[in-house]
Image (spheres, rainbow, N blue to C red):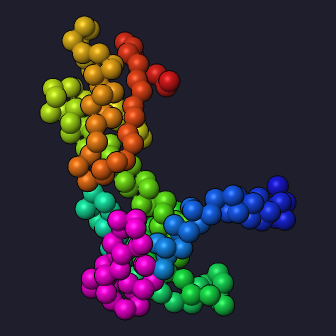
Amino acid sequence: MTDEEMVETIDNWRAASPNIVALWRTLEKAAARCIVHRTPQRAGKTGILFEYENGTLWMTLPSRRRIAYFDARYETSKFHPDRRAISYMGIEQKTKKWARIETYGGRLAENMTQATARDCLRDVMLKLDAAGFDIRAHVHDEVLLSVPEGEHTVEEVCDIMGEELPWAPGLPLHAEGYSCSYYKKD
């Protein structure tokens, strides 16, 4: 793909996804206001709260778990000198070294989404454990169970995994599964 085709593809996707782009802006504005004013900021109706404590920007998720952005700043972007950007200290993905990392609303939304999905899986795994299931592993959004033949059904597991979470009322959860004698990708 040429640079021009890439820009056109991105522009088309953003035009077709205005609610997602609005979410990015909402998160980025709330985080930036929090850093600048050092006061808690709610990101619209998302349920996300940003707080600034001792140089760290905290994103509080609907589950009440918090993600830390250490030494957060709102300053001139190193990539776009005509703009300001949120940055924090962390491990740079390519170099694996401690560095200042710029972020934006899209990445904050990704962090929020991935972390919330993780929290859903955590709570589902706790429910499965409480119901007596032997959890052997999890892979992304999968849970691997060791179940004696005839003791439980896949439907029972899916029903537990689809139950509403107290911190996410109305979040539609659904699970599918299969039974086999060895691990395989579905």
Chain part drawn in magenta: 30-56
Taking the spot 33% from the left edge, 20% from the top edge, the residue there is 155
Q: Viewer-proximal residue, 70 or 110?
A: 110
Q: Quadrant of residue 5?
A: bottom right
Q: Quadrant of residue 159?
A: top left
User: Magenta stretch: residue 14 in it?
Assistant: no
- Where 42 sits versus 156, above or below? below
Taking the spot 42% from the left edge, 27% from the top edge, the residue there is 176
Work out which residue is located at the far front of the displayed protein and give it: 170
Q: In which quadrant is the N terminus drawn? A: bottom right
Q: Viewer-proximal residue, 178 or 79?
A: 178
Please provide percent x and percent y for residue 186: 50, 24
Looking at the image, residue 3 sits to the left or right of residue 89; the answer is right
User: Magenta stretch: residue 33 in it?
Assistant: yes
- Where 110 sits versus 186, above or below? below
Looking at the image, residue 87 sits to the left or right of residue 144; the answer is right
Please provide percent x and percent y for residue 4: 84, 65
Please provide percent x and percent y for residue 16: 69, 58
Taking the spot 39% from the left edge, 14% from the top edge, the residue there is 180
Can residue 28 be seen here? The reply is yes
Please provide percent x and percent y for residue 146: 27, 20
Q: Viewer-proximal residue, 120 or 89?
A: 120
Taking the spot 23% from the left edge, 49% from the top edge, the residue there is 166
Can residue 137 be seen here? The reply is no
Looking at the image, residue 36 sits to the left or right of residue 15; the answer is left
Q: How many marks?
A: 0
Q: Viewer-proximal residue, 76 or 39?
A: 39
